[in-house]
Image (cartoon, grey):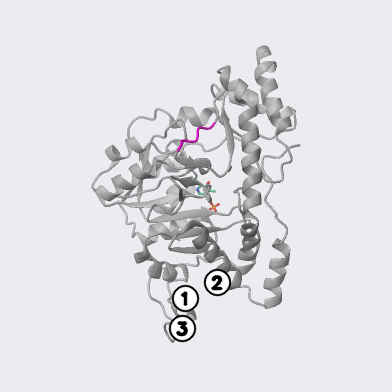
Amino acid sequence: MIPFNSPNVTGKELEYIQDVIKCRKLAGDGKYTKLCNKWIEETTTTKKALLTPSCTHALEMAALLIDIKPGDEVIMPSYTFTSTANAFVLRGATIVFVDIRPDTMNIDETKIEEAITDRTKAIAPVHYAGVACEMDTIMDIAKRYELYVVEDAAQALMGTYKGRMLGTIGHFGTLSFHETKNFISGEGGALLINDERFIERAEIIREKGTNRTQFINGKVDKYNWQDVGSSYLPSELIAAYLYAQFEHLKETLNDRISLWNDYYENLQQLVEKGLIELPIVPEECVHNGHLFYIKAKNVEERTALMKYLKEQEIQLTAHYVPLHSSPAGMKFGRFHGEDQYTTIESDRLVRLPLFSDLTSVEPIYQAVNQFYLTMKLKV
Ligand SMILES: *Cc1c(COP(=O)(O)O)cnc(C)c1O
């Protein structure tokens, strides 16, 4: 059986975890957390990176930092993971969903402005598959209406837009190191703070509302309760695993991109015959090989394709059920404008296996080709 995903291991993870145990320093913000934060800051050029237990927690921190209050509205695509919305809903916000672009599956930047009301506080673009949203347009709208931009870059570390790292363009960016992502620590995430005004408060919110970070850095002689907050820092054991991943990031990235390119080249004939569609990466974007998908004609064809590949022992998976059509989405949000693409495009999208240890994608694209060129004639 070819699984859909296999969590990435690069070699030094266990050694670094053993080092943490040997040093008897397991709580957060020790040596490995600092190494990871510094690595992220240097690699992405963000002003401040803070490891969090997950991308979900990084999004929650962003919602706290921009003071989301009941009644505020946050604009985002409906085609995303629940955490993008939940982080703001937890603070009482209403989610305003707008349609996606069919080429990238990202928020349609031309539909954002008409969804803005006097309650709108933020825009949360999601860089699906590590391919950037149209950030110049989004940042321009945010500036004109004085809105915050929280980039959900969970899938997007190392992806770029006009040469800029994803997660560093908005006021905040959030990364995920969940085992299904490119670079991992099982569960894990980071908040990127691109606007210095938020750094001090972010450190307090992350440390249970205390100024413990200032105390550790020798800036105050005792620490106390300063603000709201929670426990938003991961254990050193998690950071140790993650640092080993960062040290081999180039290899992992190259593995993924080369598999992605293999899929792309070897499925071209189906595109030329008008049978499927493949991901489109706009010229100003460099992607990170996070995921490879194809689009079948419709949901029935996708179901048949998934069934056929399962019989060949290959695991394919669909992706997000649009949030606006889910029970919580109906309760906490509304769709602004017409759902021209969100539902239709998500219904026909299917992801193919893609992970760094996958030796070859040949059996998979062959099975897909076979389905379309021979099998499907019989269905
Ligand atoms: C994976 C993912 C998340 C959640 O990440 P966690 O680290 O599991 O909390 C949020 N948004 C998007 C777009 C994701 O792909």
- Give the amino acid at mark 2: Asp
Which residues are the magenta region?
Answer: 279-283
Say which element carries label 3: loop
Q: Is residue 356 above or below residue 308?
A: below
Classify 230 as above or below 351. Answer: below
Circle 2 residue: 29
Measured as percent of width and height from the top left, residue 326 is found at: 46, 38
**What SS does tag 2 mark?**
loop
N-terminal of the pair, mark 3 or mark 1, is: 1
Q: Residue drawn at (33%, 47%), measured in percent from left and top?
A: 139
Residue most extreme to the bottom: 221
Q: Residues within 10 Å of mark 3 (few under 14, many from 20)?
A: few
The residue positioned 69% from the left and 67% from the top of the image is 17
Marks 1 & 2, CB-CB < 8 Å contact: yes
Query: x, y percentage for residue 153?
Result: 48, 49
The x, y position of residue 341, in whole percent, is 43, 29
Q: Is residue 320 left or right of residue 142?
A: right
In which image quadrant can residue 240 be found?
bottom right
Q: Residues within 10 Å of mark 2 (few under 14, many from 20)?
A: many
* Residue that label 3 marks: 218
